[in-house]
Image (tube, rainbow, N blue to C red):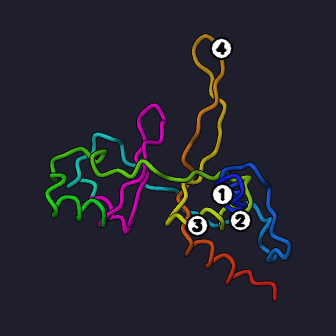
Amino acid sequence: SKFVNDKWMIKNGFLNDVQEHKPWWWNIKVQKLNLSAPLILLPEVSCQKAVEILQEKGYDQAPVVAESGLILGMVTLSNTLTSVLAGNAEFSDPVTKVTYDQFSKIGLEDSLGKLSCILENDHFAIVVHEQMQFNGNGSSFMKQMVFGVVTAMDLLTFVSRNDKK
């Protein structure tokens, strides 16, 4: 039934957008949001260290990214603490034990309309940028770089500050 759900189709890139009366910001690109550089955790960071880092830096969540650049998921302060308190994880465990591996990605060139559709169901989206890299023998490959994390509050802040009514 997903193929008849327009919001699912937009979120997964099968439709551009089908909303007839789009708000003024609908087609603006995600890159126009004023996102700060993300705090990134490597998978071997312990749950305790992750909590300390998030609290010290004032973040609620951070992407967990392998040294290879592979995005493993998102760790949140609340999920980490809840998992430890429930006995499902220990502070000494690597942060990957409490990482959400279900997450949405959006590109800098995607529209705020597509982002809006994603944020109707998800608390956040990881903003990625494709970058061409070359290895020692001269062959190239595309690598996704985490550019930021965007929430509904980021979108709402952008819309309210730039409201064109």
Question: Residues at badges 1 and 3 in contact (C-beta under 8 Å)?
Answer: no
With respect to residue 135, does 81 lie above or below?
below
The one nearer the camera, 43 or 21, is 21
Magenta stretch holds residue 56: yes
**Mark 1 or 2, which is nearer the eye?**
1
> Callout 3, which amino acid?
Leu
Quadrant containing the N terminus is bottom right
- Give the CA distance from mark 4 to mark 1: 39 Å
Label at residue 43: none
Q: Residues within 10 Å of mark 2 (few under 14, many from 20)?
A: many
Question: Residues at badges 2 and 4 in contact (C-beta under 8 Å)?
Answer: no
**Residue designated by label 1:** 8
Q: Residues within 10 Å of mark 3 (few under 14, many from 20)?
A: some
- Give the CA distance from mark 1 to mark 3: 12 Å
**Residue designated by label 3:** 119
Label at residue 112: 2
Residue at 43% in and 42% down: 72
The one nearer the camera, 27 or 122, is 122
Q: Residues within 10 Å of mark 4 (few under 14, many from 20)?
A: few
